Image: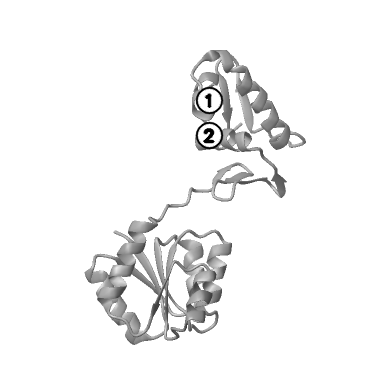
Amino acid sequence: MTKILVVEDDEGIVGFLKRGLEAEGFVVDVAADGEQALQLCRDLDYPLIILDVMLPEIDGIEVCRTLRRQMKQSLILMLTARDSVQDKIEGLRSGADDYLAKPFAIDELLARIHALLRRAPYIEPAAVLAVGDLVLDPATRRAQRGDREIELTAKEFVLLRYLMENAGTVLSRSRILSNVWEHSSDTYTNIVDVYIRYLRSKIDTGTQSQLIRTVRGVGYMISDKA
């Protein structure tokens, strides 16, 4: 079931939306102001957010901008009593996917929601990966070991992600080759060794614990276990 966050401070409208959305089979969470909405979105990922523009604390436009700066992929449908062209432009420019003026019929809202979900299906963000003090965020492609930011090339990123997704597992050169380079021939396995050296120089050099391990005669693994 699709979970929707309703951000609205009018209790009457909240009740109206919850009844209509739950009758349609959606699961509904509610935030009464912009600050609460941002807190919920830090902890949970919502496929769709219904966001009122006029909110206490932080208004809907700023909430939308903040979510987009945070790379949140949720679809955002804005609600507002202001329906001028300029207001709609401001809402869309802030990162909203659609805009609906109050008052509105629940049938129109549901039609807009289903159209959004069909046109731009929500993609679950990839989980942040961590091995010891090494962290990789696939969504932003940022890697960090402790307080140190690590610059990665495109291929280094793919290789590191594959190693971290299989942390603690010994991966043969041919398996790495087929998953990272999409080659199956052992002829090219030397390229795996080359890129492992690149990663080691960026991740393990100057540290007390070595995360990327060589398993002689087999291949490589990444692990923080002794």
**Element at badge 1?**
helix
Circles 2 and 1: CB atoms closer than 8 Å: yes
Q: Is residue 223 visible?
A: no
**Outermost residue, front side:** 85
Q: What element does badge 2 sit on?
A: helix
Residue 140 or 202: which is nearer the viewer? 140
Give the residue type at disc 2.
Tyr
Q: Is residue 192 visible?
A: yes
Numbered circle sitting on residue 162: 2
Rendered residue at 39%/57% (across/down)? 120
In the image, residue 85 lies at what x, y percent? 48, 80
| Above or below, comparing residue 35 to residue 67 in the picture | below
Residue 176 disc label = 1
Mark 2–mark 1 distance (CA, rounded to whole Å): 8 Å
**Residue found 43% across the figure and 52% down from its top:** 124
* Depicted 199 relative to depicted 41: above or below: above
Q: Residue at position x 59%, y 35% from top?
A: 160
Residue 172 lies left or right of residue 29; in this view the side is right
Quarter of the image for residue 25 reads bottom left
Give the amino acid type for the residue marked by disc 1 in the picture.
Ile
Q: Where residue 94 sits: x, y (%)?
A: 54, 70
Taking 76 as reference, is 148 left or right? right
Q: Badge 2: how crowded within 10 Å, few (<14), some, or many (20+)? A: some
**Position of the N terminus by quadrant:** bottom left
